[in-house]
């Protein structure tokens, strides 16, 4: 007998199981590794296996968003953070772990817990009834992915996810760029001035940029990635650039219909169309994050950073996320999940972890943590009190459950661009102010909701 069925014993599923079990709920944790199944990236049968790097990134909770997330998870008695401390290896201000010790610690805590039953089985369909948390990750097994597709009405979930860089608005030099939609056609009545930030390029700048794209260092495909199709409309920019120097000027970088106010003359009082343009589109409701339109890329990170610095207006751009390309399975969460991570079409099912469209070990675990807490509250008949959007957990959760633009939704790391802005605080101390505010608001939320804190 169990109260909640968790599918997937990775980072998010293990964390959700712990949170529920610690609150007295009986959990069945189904993990397919260990019954003869494997994903293309995992190497062991251990719960919470880290598939690539061994880093939980920055542990600095005074001025770093992921460090703040660590702090909040510790305050909420995270199993991933507990096991991470035991398995910790030296890594400066980052938190890195011995992956085998880490996985063994998680496995020990769950298999010895009286409220958890770990079952090695592959689940192929979404349960029709009973509280369920699906945490099957970016490499969800095919049959279950099909079942999720049917339940969400999506066309498909797994594809090569070619993602474009996302830029912090405050780092864009608006003295060189302007806001306008092509032909002044805005998509929203409230955006009278236009929907896009336009970074104009001269011919010389464009030719140099094109050369950088074609010659830049690119990530190679892994063998198992080779059969997965590109997501329609997500062709990497360097693949387009390879087709000829003019291809991009007739594609995402075309300048037609855009009046450059920095290039006016008697003949063009409103401004000439630029030779080429890089456009950025708003990526979150706060307007703090902007997505480089059509710039999904396989370029290595250093090459991406170097190249983006050659774009007028982006010379000092700070990115919330760089571009990349890998197989990923994730929901269009802003569209299909409610604010409590429940499938709108089948509210007995919650999703957690990377499959919800967060990105990274820590983020995936944190969404598992919050899904476990939400399910425990539901089971106990308590009303869920929303987490403040000023906390890292609350900001990430708000983003994936509704604040991100559904039409362009892509996996996201936690970053300060997701937080309600603090314009009144000077730039130099803004990160410290974000973390101070987040910590204070979480402490208040814990006190008000009497949520579990470590003893
Ligand atoms: C190749 C690759 C490399 C990555 N590298 C990094 C990195 O270096 N750093 C980082 O921060 N993030 C990285 N990520 C992103 C992400 O943070 C991790 O994938 C993370 O493990 C996600 O946590 P999760 O719990 O959502 O999924 P997972 O940890 O993958 O857990 C999902 C679990 O569900 C199981 N499962 C799947 N389908 C079924 C089923 N039908 N029935 C039962 N069980 C099932 C799987 O076996 C797995 O154990 C990487 C992702 C990939 C794909």
Image: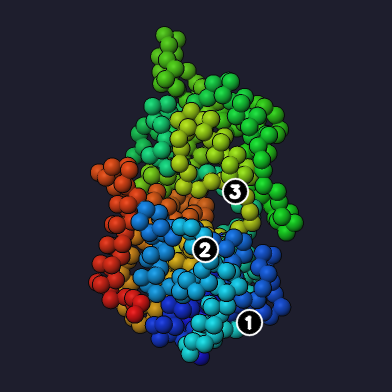
- The residue shown at (40%, 54%) is 64
Question: Residue 394 or 309: which is nearer the viewer?
Answer: 309
State the scheme by which the image is colored. rainbow
> How many residues crowd around disc 1 within 10 Å: few (fewer than 14), some, or many (20 or more)?
some
> How many residues crowd around disc 3 within 10 Å: few (fewer than 14), some, or many (20 or more)?
many
Which numbered disc flags the more N-terminal residue, 2 or 1? 2
Which numbered disc flags the more N-terminal residue, 2 or 3? 2
Mark 2–mark 1 distance (CA, rounded to whole Å): 33 Å
Question: Residue 257 or 272: which is nearer the viewer?
Answer: 272
> How many residues crowd around disc 2 within 10 Å: few (fewer than 14), some, or many (20 or more)?
few
Q: Which quadrant would residue 186 be assigned to in this image?
A: top left
Q: Position of residue 300 (x, y in %)?
A: 62, 44
Asked whether, in this view, residue 151 is left or right of residue 418, the answer is right
Asked whether, in this view, residue 245 is left or right of residue 280, the answer is right
Q: Quadrant of the C terminus?
A: bottom left
What residue does disc 3 label?
A: 324
Q: What's the mark number on residue 265?
A: none
- Quick one: SS at disc 3? strand
Q: Which quadrant would residue 187 be assigned to in this image?
A: top left
Q: What's the mark number on residue 120?
A: 1
What residue does disc 2 label?
A: 90
Ligand 1: image quarter: bottom right
Mark 1–mark 3 distance (CA, rounded to whole Å): 33 Å
Q: Is residue 405 something one can see in this rendering?
A: yes
- The residue shown at (59%, 66%) is 50
Q: Is residue 28 something one can see in this rendering?
A: no
Asked if labels 3 and 2 touch by Cβ distance under 8 angstroms, the answer is: no
Mark 1 CB near ligand 1 (8 Å cut): no
Residue farthest along the top direction in this orientation: 266
Q: Position of residue 115 (x, y in %)?
A: 47, 87
């Amino acid at each position: 007998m169990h109260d909640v069925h968790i599918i997937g014993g990775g980072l998010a599923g293990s964390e959700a199981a712990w949170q529920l079990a610690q609150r007295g709920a009986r959990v069945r944790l189904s993990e397919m590794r260990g019954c003869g199944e494997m994903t293309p990236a995992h190497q062991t049968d251990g719960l919470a296996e880290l598939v690539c790097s061994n880093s939980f990134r920055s542990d600095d909770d005074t001025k770093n968003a992921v460090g703040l997330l660590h702090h909040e998870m510790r305050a909420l008695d995270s199993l991933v953070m507990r096991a991470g401390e035991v398995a910790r290896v030296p890594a400066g201000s980052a938190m890195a772990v011995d992956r085998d010790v880490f996985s063994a610690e998680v496995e020990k805590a769950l298999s010895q817990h009286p409220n958890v039953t770990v079952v090695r089985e592959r689940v192929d369909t979404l349960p029709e009834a009973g509280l369920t948390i699906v945490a099957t990750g970016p490499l969800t097994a095919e049959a279950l992915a099909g079942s999720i597709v049917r339940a969400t009405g999506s066309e498909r979930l797994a594809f090569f996810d070619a993602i474009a860089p996302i830029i912090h608005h405050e780092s864009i030099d608006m003295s060189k760029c302007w806001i306008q939609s092509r032909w002044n056609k805005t998509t929203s009545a409230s955006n009278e001035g236009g929907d896009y930030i336009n970074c104009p390029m001269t011919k010389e700048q464009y030719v140099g940029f094109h050369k950088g794209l074609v010659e830049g260092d690119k990530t190679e495909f892994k063998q198992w990635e080779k059969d997965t199709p590109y997501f329609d409309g997500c062709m990497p920019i360097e693949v387009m650039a390879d087709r000829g120097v003019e291809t991009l000027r007739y594609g995402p970088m075309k300048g037609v219909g855009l009046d450059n106010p920095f290039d006016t003359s008697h003949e063009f009082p409103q401004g000439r169309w630029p030779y080429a343009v890089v456009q950025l589109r708003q990526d979150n409701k706060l307007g703090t994050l902007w997505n480089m339109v059509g710039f999904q890329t396989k370029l290595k990170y250093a090459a991406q950073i170097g190249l983006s610095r050659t774009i007028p207006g982006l010379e000092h751009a700070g990115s919330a996320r760089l571009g990349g390309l890998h197989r990923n399975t994730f929901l269009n969460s802003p569209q299909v999940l409610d604010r409590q991570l429940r499938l709108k079409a089948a509210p007995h099912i919650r999703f957690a972890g990377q499959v919800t469209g967060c990105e990274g070990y820590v983020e995936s675990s944190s969404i598992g943590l919050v899904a476990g807490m939400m399910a425990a509250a539901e089971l106990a008949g308590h009303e869920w009190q929303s987490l403040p959007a000023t906390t890292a957990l609350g900001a990430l959760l708000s983003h994936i459950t509704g604040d991100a633009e559904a039409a362009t939704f892509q996996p996201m790391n936690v970053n300060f661009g997701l937080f309600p802005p603090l314009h009144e605080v000077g730039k130099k101390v803004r990160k410290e102010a974000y973390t101070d505010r987040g910590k204070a608001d979480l402490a208040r939320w814990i006190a008000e909701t009497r949520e579990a804190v470590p003893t």
